Image: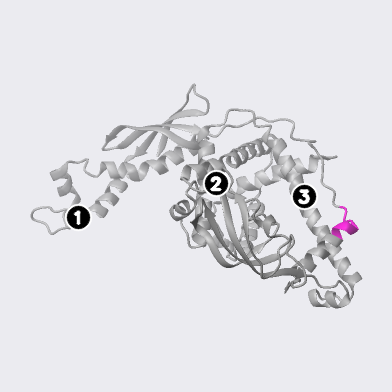
């Protein structure tokens, strides 16, 4: 492959490349195509799959294998040409074959490239950091959460149902005097006050006692997902079988021994204090980075090619597909279950994709402007970290992640650290 010329077009971030694929590369591709296709070619006088290449070319024309050979060679030739031209292509907008002959072929491609931003104002960004002070109230809240997790459900027999109780009920719903589909259940566990049923349903059970049978009147919301019920008045016949509430354990030394390796309540509170401190520190650091990120994204004022956003959205959808596959689903099945279209998922990811693209471009600009580099040692250390993370050997990771791509990621990370270090905490 050789790059004949690179021409900057008037349209922003567009270049036209003229690329020559040399004879030896093209001939090797033609031979490769012949070996792949010959098994399906019948030539009189030869067994199927045994006809020599020159015989097939004489019968069908010398160009019989050219199209497939071009398809096989132009992607890598274009990739090499963009690197030689010092361009970072994000999409191929047009491609045409100019000449094909005994000495190879020439093609032209119009590509969109990532812009090289010039940014300012990334040092000394003022950020208000969240408080990380551990108060007694926060420790008590953590202790209460532990109590809640270790509570047990007990049957209530000496009072009516109240908010927070779990009731076991039979119910059947009617509209216009007729029972409707999906409106009946037996021995249903319903926690009062959670708002899981239509407005007024749970509230109407409060105050009733075990063994009671009663009717409640409610109205379905106008935007209810079943059109035949939306906005309609309804009656539900209810039978209340059981009332249950959560009984929380007493907080004392015995409770502490049951839920931890500590012996006393005071020791356990110190442990919870350390746990809360760690959580607050992590939340504050994450919020700090998010605020810095938002500030950096605002620095991306240049025109950014639409293709970069589309590529990022597609990458995010592919990652989502991989998550679904790990759960035994595929995207098509998920869309059927949810009643969504692929476009709706893409639209959901779009804002985050735009933010990611802008942030990356800004950090790349900072790395260029600050002359930030990544060393061979940096790259090797990162391979080792990734190997530990995924339980692989470093050499195995190298098969999946190219060193130059990893080096670029390291430079971006260093740029972000520079922004962090220079930030002003308010």
Visual colour scheme: one colour
Identify the residue at the far top of this view: 10
* Tag in front: 1 or 2: 2
* Residue at which label 3 appears: 285
Is 137 magenta? The answer is yes
Residue 197 visible in the shown view = no
Element carrying mark 3: helix
For the image, the number of numbered tags is 3
**Picture quarter containing residue 213?**
bottom right
Element carrying mark 2: loop
Q: Return the disc, 1 or 2, that comes first in the chain's sequence.
A: 1
**Of the pair 234 and 19, the residue shown nearer to us:** 234
Magenta residues (range): 133-139
Q: Return the disc, 3 or 1, that comes first in the chain's sequence.
A: 1
Distance Cα–Cα, label 2 vs label 3: 50 Å
**Of the pair 14 and 161, the residue shown nearer to us:** 161
Label 1 Cα crowd, 10 Å radius (few <14 / some 14-19 / many 20+): few
Residue 186's x, y, as percent? 56, 68
- At x 53%, y 37%, the residue is 308
């Amino acid at each position: 492959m050789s790059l004949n010329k690179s021409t900057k077009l008037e349209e922003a971030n567009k270049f036209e490349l003229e690329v020559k694929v040399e004879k030896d590369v093209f001939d090797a591709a033609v031979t490769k195509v012949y070996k792949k296709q010959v098994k399906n070619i019948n030539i009189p006088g030869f067994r199927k799959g045994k006809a020599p290449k020159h015989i097939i070319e004489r019968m069908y024309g010398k160009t019989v294998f050219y199209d497939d050979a071009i398809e096989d060679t132009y992607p890598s030739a274009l990739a090499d040409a963009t690197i030689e031209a010092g361009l970072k292509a994000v999409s191929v907008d047009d491609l045409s074959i100019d000449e094909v002959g005994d000495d190879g072929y020439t093609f032209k491609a119009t590509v969109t490239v990532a812009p090289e931003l010039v940014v300012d104002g990334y040092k000394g960004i003022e950020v208000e950091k969240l408080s990380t002070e551990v108060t007694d109230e926060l420790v008590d809240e953590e202790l209460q959460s532990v109590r809640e997790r270790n509570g047990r459900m007990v049957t209530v027999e000496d009072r009516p149902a109240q908010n927070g109780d779990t009731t076991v009920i039979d119910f059947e719903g009617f509209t216009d005097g007729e029972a409707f589909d999906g409106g009946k259940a037996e021995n249903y566990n319903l926690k009062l006050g959670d708002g899981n049923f239509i407005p007024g349903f749970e509230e109407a059970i409060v105050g009733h006692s075990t063994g009671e049978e009663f009717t409640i009147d409610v109205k379905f919301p106008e935007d209810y997902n079943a059109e035949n019920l939306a906005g309609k008045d309804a009656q539900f016949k209810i039978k209340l079988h059981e009332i249950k509430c959560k009984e929380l354990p007493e907080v004392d030394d015995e409770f502490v021994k049951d839920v931890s390796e500590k012996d006393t309540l005071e020791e356990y509170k110190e442990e919870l204090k350390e746990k809360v401190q760690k959580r607050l520190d992590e939340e504050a650091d994450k919020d700090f980075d998010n605020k810095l990120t938002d500030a950096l994204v605002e620095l991306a004022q240049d025109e950014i090619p639409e293709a970069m956003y589309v590529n990022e959205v597609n990458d995010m959808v592919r990652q989502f597909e991989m998550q679904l596959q790990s759960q035994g689903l595929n995207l098509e099945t998920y869309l059927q279950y949810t009643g969504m279209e692929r476009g709706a998922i893409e639209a959901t990811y779009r804002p985050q994709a735009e933010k990611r693209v802008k942030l990356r471009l800004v950090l790349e600009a900072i790395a260029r402007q600050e002359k930030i580099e990544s060393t061979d040692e940096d790259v090797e250390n990162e391979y080792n970290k990734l190997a530990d993370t995924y339980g692989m050997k470093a050499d195995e990771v190298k098969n999946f992640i190219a060193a130059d791509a990893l080096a670029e990621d390291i430079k971006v990370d260093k740029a972000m650290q520079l922004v962090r270090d220079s930030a002003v905490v308010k």
